[in-house]
Image (spheres, rainbow, N blue to C red):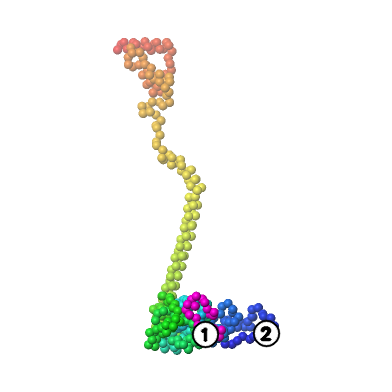
Amino acid sequence: MDQMPEQDDASPVSTAPATPTSPFEFKMLPLFMDFEDFSICQPAPFSYDDKAMLELERCDYTQRITYQMARAGKTTRRVRVYADGIYDLFHQGHARQLMQAKNVFPNVYLIVGVCNDELTLRMKGRTVMNGFERYEAVRHCRYVDEIVPNAPWTLNDEFLDEHKIDFVAHDDIPYGAGGVNDIYAPLKARGMFVATERTEGVSTSDIVARIVKDYDVYVRRNLARGYSAKELNVSFLSEKKFRLQNKMDELKSRGKRELTKVKVDIITKWEEKSREFIDAFLLLFGKERLNTFWNESKGRIIQALSPPGSPNGSINGDDPDASDGANSEDEYMELPPEHGTDSVGSINRKQKRSGQVKPSPSPNDTNEEHEDVVHEHRSD
């Protein structure tokens, strides 16, 4: 790896950001760069890097560490724990396994071995990510202190001594290979094995199975994103079928958007019309208009709801204006019984009813009329 040029101690260190001489000079960080200036977050070094070699030299491997010593934290140096695997499609299951290995003992220096493509293809099968991608994925995990590329499939004493490994971390499920039922059995017998737990429900095989299950969906998605049929290893007819399906889905989505737009327009117009109708109704039948309408029609309503009034005259034709005073006395004034039934009062009543009431006669006239009446009565 290229080293950065050393600066003179006497020369001042500039903290100002560098100014690019061209707009594309600092478009992205270089793939290979010196991380010495990044003291907070750094990727784990490879086993052949200077940092890893220095850590290896400082380790006194002559002082062997037992499991009890490591668990109790009674060690004079860091405990070197080794975990290996393929780490294809690096996921949370891998990260959790490395986290357990990092925290299995106090003061652990975690070394992770990653097998290369050739060995993996021969022993297990094709990977999705190549060796370089898998190395980079693991060395950027926060729990990893060192990466061993081209790691062996089985561990022997030579490899353990070369990297000064105290313990090997892996899940406790027997892992067979090359006619051996469990390649970690010798380490378990020597007390150099620590078990980690697998994360259920997630693995590289599960992720690949999801992709295979939804193969059409992912092919259509990548075709829509600009990948060619050759890059996706898709036949000519399959490509046309997938593109037609993408077009149909696009038309459906466009139709849904247009239908939603039409619905929104209809609702908006209905709201506008309803506001106009409400405004017109309030203008026509508002509070002031309703008060005026009520005042104008109140009398008619009361007259229509009231019962009919009493007639002006009585049924017998009596004068309603007649009082119970003198007129009543005159009306019921009768002659003595000896003058017969046809009394003067009756005559007076008839005259009053007919409106032919004569003025009161003088005393002389009264006597003369009385004599005439008596005379007529006697003649009868």
Residue picked out by circle 1: 62
Please state which amino acid type lies under the numbered disc 1. Thr
Q: Residue 220: x and y, percent?
A: 43, 79
Residue beneath the point at 46% across and 65% down? 264
The answer, for residue 225, to whether it is visible in the render is no
Residue drawn at the location 38% of the way across and 84% of the way down: 181
The rendered magenta stretch, by its main secondary structure, is classed as loop
Extreme residue in the right direction: 10
Image quadrant occupied by the N terminus: bottom right
Of residue 80 and residue 177, the one placed in the foreground of this image is 80
Q: Quadrant of residue 36?
A: bottom right
- Which mark's residue is nearer the viewer, 1 or 2? 1
Answer whether residue 145 is visible to the viewer in this image: yes
Picture coordinates of residue 369 (x, y %)?
Answer: 38, 12
Residue range corresponding to the magenta coloring: 56-78
Say which of 319 and 254 sits in front: 254
The numbered mark, 1 or 2, whose residue comes first in the sequence reads: 2
Q: Please give the label number shown on residue 8.
A: 2
Could you say where residue 77 lies in the image, as x and y percent from the top left?
54, 80
Q: Amino acid at mark 2?
A: Asp
The residue at the far left in this view is 380
Q: How many residues crowd mark 1 within 10 Å: few (<14), some (14–19), many (20+)?
A: few
Label 1 and label 2: CA atoms lie apart by: 40 Å
State the image coordinates of residue 88 (x, y, percent, origin top left): 45, 82
- Picture residue at 45% right of the left edge, 79% below the top: 194
Rendered residue at 39%/36% (across/down)? 308
Against 248, residue 325 (above or below) is: above
Quadrant where the C terminus sits is top left
Residue 322 is covered by the magenta coloring: no
In front: 58, or 196?
58
